[in-house]
């Protein structure tokens, strides 16, 4: 008999282009709102695709979950979105937050981000005005 590890999902959190938080995201999905929009900055950088999705993160979202010191060193939007969604998922579980380490609990999040090597390569091309040569 093969033993299988089981995972129980007890909470959900969302930081998506059409809603931050489970209630806003669910409302947007039910209303058929995608969150995809035109970005002037992509046009200015001469990207051939100038639409995209970015979660509407407000100051209220960031200050709820991060201290000013934490935000000062947080330069990755993917980590910001993941942190917010992760904290909202934790709250959704109903499990009280604690400073004690519990190795049986955790948060898993995903983001549509490039790998660091590809990202670094792309930044140099964008800085040189070669956005059309980025590839997929």
Image (cartoon, helix red, strand yellow):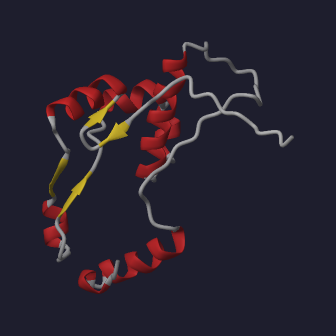
Q: Position of residue 57 (x, y in %)?
A: 31, 37
Give the quadrant of residue 13.
top left
The residue sitting at the right extreme is 1
Q: Position of residue 21 (x, y in %)?
A: 35, 28
- Quarter-wise, where is residue 100 in the image? top right
Query: In the image, is residue 66 above or below residue 71?
Result: above
Instruction: Describe residue 23's horizontal placement relative to residue 77 as left or right.
Output: left
Which residue is depicted at the point 20% across and 30% down? 30
Quadrant where the N terminus sits is top right
Q: Position of residue 90 (x, y in %)?
A: 54, 24
Q: Name the foreground residue: 56 vs 28.
A: 28
- Whether residue 136 sits left or right of residue 115 in the image: it is left
The quadrant the C terminus occupies is bottom left
Relative image position of residue 92 (x, y in whole percent)? 48, 19
Residue drawn 39% across the image and 33% down it: 62
Left or right, 25 with respect to 78, comes to left
Front in this rendered view, residue 1 or 79 = 1
Residue sitting at 44 percent across and 50 percent down?
Answer: 78
Q: Is residue 84 above or below residue 41?
A: above
Q: Nearer the viewer, residue 7 or 106?
A: 7
Residue that protrudes farthest toward the front in the picture: 1
Q: Residue at x 49, y 38 (%)?
A: 83
């Amino acid at each position: 008999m093969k033993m299988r590890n089981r995972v129980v999902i007890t909470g959900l959190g969302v930081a998506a282009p059409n809603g931050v938080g489970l209630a806003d995201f669910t409302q947007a999905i039910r209303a058929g709102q995608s969150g995809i929009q035109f970005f002037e900055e992509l046009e200015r950088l001469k990207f051939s695709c100038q639409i995209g999705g970015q979660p509407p993160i407000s100051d209220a979202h960031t200050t709820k979950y991060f201290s000013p010191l934490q935000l000062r060193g947080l330069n990755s939007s993917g980590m910001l979105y993941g942190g917010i969604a992760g904290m909202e998922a934790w709250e959704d579980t109903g499990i009280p937050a604690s400073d004690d380490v519990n190795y049986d609990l955790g948060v898993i999040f995903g983001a549509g981000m490039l790998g660091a090597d590809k990202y670094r390569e792309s930044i140099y091309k964008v800085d040189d005005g070669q956005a059309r040569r980025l590839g997929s």
